[in-house]
Image (spheres, helix red, strand yellow):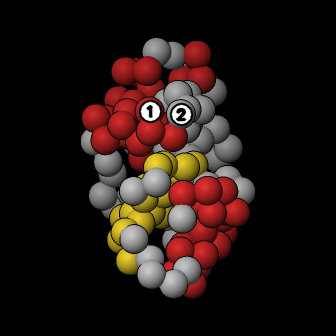
Amino acid sequence: MKATIWHNPKCGTSRKTLAILEETPGVEVQVIEYLKTPPSADKLAQLYRDAGITPQQGLRIRGTDAEERGLPQADDATVLAAMTADPILIERPLVETEKGVRLCRPQETVHQIL
């Protein structure tokens, strides 16, 4: 099975999720450091749709200026555009496998798609 993780190595939850993926037999992991290589707005929209959440639910509030910018109440296109322009606004980690997509907070959530 292939798994793609949109990862921030400075985030403990992201590191723990990556460790679960790497320790799971038969999982080939692709790591994308999304702060260096942000996903496109279309890719983010697809990930959130497949995870069953809205872009607003995938918005990182803590440690960002998302609230001040009014992003939690903004429309999907505005949130996605803000995330692609400033990827720190993307809550992490997002993991995609053939079984689906999850925002893995807490990290154990990743087991749902393995």
Label 1 – label 2 distance at C-alpha: 5 Å
* Tag 2 residue: 52
* Tag 1 residue: 49
Q: Nearer the viewer, residue 86 or 28?
A: 28
Q: Nearer the viewer, residue 44 or 69?
A: 44
Question: Which residue is found at the position 35% from the left and 29% from the top?
Answer: 81
In this view, 91 is above or below 107: above
- Residue 85, numbered circle: none
Identify the secondary structure beneath mark 1. helix
Q: Residues within 10 Å of mark 2 (few under 14, many from 20)?
A: some
Q: Nearer the viewer, residue 76 or 61?
A: 76
Question: Which residue is found at the position 48% from the left and 49% from the top?
Answer: 101
In this view, 109 is above or below 81: below
Q: Amino acid at mark 2?
A: Gly
Q: Residue 51: x percent and y percent? A: 51, 40
State the image quarter where residue 40 is shown: top left
Q: Nearer the viewer, residue 85 or 28?
A: 28
In this view, 5 is above or below 15: above
Q: Residue 27: x percent and y percent? A: 44, 77
